[in-house]
Amino acid sequence: MKIAIGIEYHGAYFQGWQSQPNAAGVQDAIERAIAQVSGVKVRLHAAGRTDAGVHALMQVAHFETAVVRPLSAWVRGTNAHLPAWVRILWAVEVADDFHARFSARARSYQYVLHNHAIAPASQHGRVGWYHRPLAVAAMQQAVSVLLGEHDFSAFRASECQASTPIRTMQRADITQQGRYIIFSFQANAFLQHQIRNMVGALVYVGQGKLSVTAFADLLQNKDRRLSPPTFMPDGLYFTAVDYDASWQLPVCEARWD
C-alpha cells in the first residue's frame, strides 16, 4: 500500500530535508522512525525539499509498504521514535498513482521576519531578523511584480539543478503584524534558494537600497550576480501543498498567520 503523511519540523536541527551521508536530514530521521514501526526500511518521497535551517508547518511525503498497520500507528508510533522537533501530523492511504511531488499542483512558503533593533531571543532560529526599520509599503509594491509566469534566474542559486528557471507565481504578498513582517508565496514550484533570494532583494527595497523599479529590473535582467545576497534561512517555512481534491487528502496547509 501507499501511505501519505503530513509533517511538521524545526529545520534548525537538520541539514535540510534530503537524506544526508551523515544521516542528518529530516528524511533520515523519519525513515528511521517508520522502520521502527514497520520492521522494514522505507523510502520517503516529499512534495518539496527544504534547505538546512528551513522549517515546515506542512510538508507532505509518501512511502510504500507491504506491512499492514493502523493509520494511527503511522502517526503515534512513528512520533514515539522521533525527536521532539519533528512530528507526523496525519497519515492516509492513497491510490497507487499518487506521488507527493508529482501530484502537487502548487507549493506555498512563508518567510517571517522580526523587524526590531534587538534580535528575538525566544524565537532564535525560528524567525529572520533585520535591525533597522523597513519601508513595508515599498516592499508590498515591489513584491507584486513577481506575480505570474517569469524566468526567475535573478533569484536562482548558482548550484540549482532545475531544468528550467520558469515558474508561475500565484501568490506574492507581504503583511505586517507588529514587529513581524510576513512574506507569503505560492507557485507551481520553486528554484533552489529562490524565496530567500527574493526576500533578500525585498529587504533591500525596504532599506531604500533598491527602488521598486530597480527590483523589477532585477527580475527582467535574469542575472543572479546583480541581485542582493541570499537572506538567512531561519524565518522560512514550508506551509502548504496544493493537491486535487480527488486525492482526498487532509487539509495540506498550516499557515503562520
Image: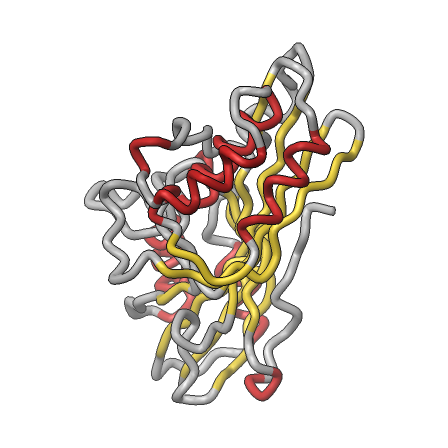
Q: Nearer the viewer, residue 98 or 75?
A: 98
Residue 217 percent coordinates (x, y): 45, 40
Of all residues, the one furthest to the left in this rendering is 21
Q: Residue at x 64, y 34 (%)?
A: 139
Q: Is residue 25 left or right of residue 178?
A: left
| 19 over 112 or under it: above or below | below
Residue 134 percent coordinates (x, y): 66, 22
Of all residues, the one furthest to the top in this rendering is 117
Q: Is residue 61 left or right of residue 7?
A: left
For the N terminus, the image quarter is bottom left
Q: Residue at x 31, y 68 (%)?
A: 42
| 87 over 22 or under it: above or below | below
- Colouring chosen for the image of the structure: secondary structure
Count of marks overlaid on the render: 0
Residue 101 percent coordinates (x, y): 40, 70
Q: Nearer the viewer, residue 85 or 77?
A: 85
Residue 3 percent coordinates (x, y): 46, 77
Q: Residue at x 53, y 40 (%)?
A: 236
Q: Is residue 240 left or right of residue 180?
A: left
Of all residues, the one furthest to the right in this rendering is 178
Choose top left, top right, bottom left or bottom right for residue 92.
bottom right
Choose top left, top right, bottom left or bottom right for residue 208.
top right
Q: Residue at x 39, y 49 (%)?
A: 26
Q: Nearer the viewer, residue 159 or 201?
A: 201
Q: Nearer the viewer, residue 121 or 116?
A: 116
